[in-house]
Image (cartoon, coloured by chain):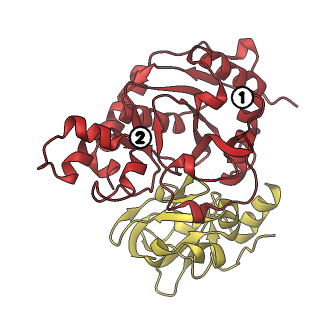
Chain colours: A yellow, B red
Amino acid sequence: MSEVPADRFYLSSHEWAQEGDDGVVTIGITEFAASELGELVYIELPGEGEDVHFEQQFGEIESVKAVSALNSPLSGQVIESNASLLDSQEPITDSPFEEGWMLKIKPADDSWKDQLMTPADYESQLNNS
Amino acid sequence: MILKPAKIHLLDPGPLDPASNMALDEVLLESEGWWLRLTRWDRPCVTLGRFQSWPQNSSDESFPQIHPFSSQFVSATQPSPTSSPGEIAESLPAVRRVTGGGSILHGEDLTIAIAGPCPSPHFPDRSPGKVATQISKVLGSLLSPGIHTRGGEDREKEMVDVVDCFQRRSPSDLVLEVDGETVKAGGLALAFRPGRVLIEGSLHRGPASRPVEGDRSWMELLMREWLGAEGETAEKWQTDLTDEQAGRVSEAVENRFGTVEWNRR
């Protein structure tokens, strides 16, 4: 059973979002998504200052000859991108909820959590898939 | 159990230029329903994987791998010793795909594309490895006897620096045993977008023993045997792009597939 941390929110396409004390939201993909993707070889992420939009593609990741879209769990502006992932994608697989974070985002509004799944809802989705 | 999808489209728009071909595949990835497409080329060309690097100059040792007919092309069209590597590279017919994997030389292969919903009854799992192996087994069962899915462990990381798709090894490869050696007869590359998957396939005609005139029959077999479509559920072959499709292809070529920024990264 994949880990589903209780301190963040989820998108049905297996991205997570965690709010920090400063209101900045960190996003990444879940352990389930990372395990499904298999061995990762490339990733492309947006740079600082770029806008991302709820449920819209913010990047791409390649594994097993397949390029998969990464979807943003909220709208806002990128204030930091995890550039170390461009050189090595292993943290995404080994530590998807911590070292494998992808973007830090300044939310466009305060209601971003309303559109996302709770940990219980996401866990239920995993159990039913 | 036969699972019947609601809508299946068979598409054979005839030979297109490399950029339009790859743009059309992306249009199908973003369209609704199932699409089975025959991809035909108006010239020999190379397609590159989404994240492959284009060699910095033509003396790069990977250059002939990424573009097998580059030396012939260059000698025929660029006799001037003053031509810069950039000018030479610029003139080569190569286009970047939205799918992953290595570079493929097209022109004499059987190139196909399959686009459809995922997850779905036919692709219940979005895992790239599982989808690739699943469709490889389906294709293998419909090709010549002896062609089968390679199987084994995923070694994707080891294959990254191998430029040519047909020199790479992947569990989803279609392979054939020839004189005790395993020969790659077909390769697949995939792209996932929300709710959809695109599978591009290149099958060697030699080992596959599929004459060009039989391509449509083979795709119809794929439609019946795998997608479970009966005669009345299948549409006739679409040979011309709709105005909407043509417009989307033109836009994608202009903005990406026909640009240096996209193809020569």
Q: Is residue B137 left or right of residue A73?
A: right
Residue denoted by label 2: B46
Residue denoted by label 1: B143
Q: Is residue A12 left or right of residue B107?
A: right
Q: Position of residue A28 (x, y in %)?
A: 56, 71
| Residue B193 can be seen in this image | no
Chain letter of the residue carrying label 1: B
Give the residue at x 47% y 81%.
A23
Label 1 SS: loop
- Residue B96 versus residue A112 in the image, above or below: above
Q: Position of residue B107 (x, y in %)?
A: 45, 29
Quarter where residue B237 is shown: top right
Q: Amino acid at mark 2?
A: Val
Q: Position of residue B83 (x, y in %)?
A: 15, 48
Q: Amino acid at mark 1?
A: Leu
Of residues A17 and B213, the one drawn nearer to the viewer in this rendering: B213
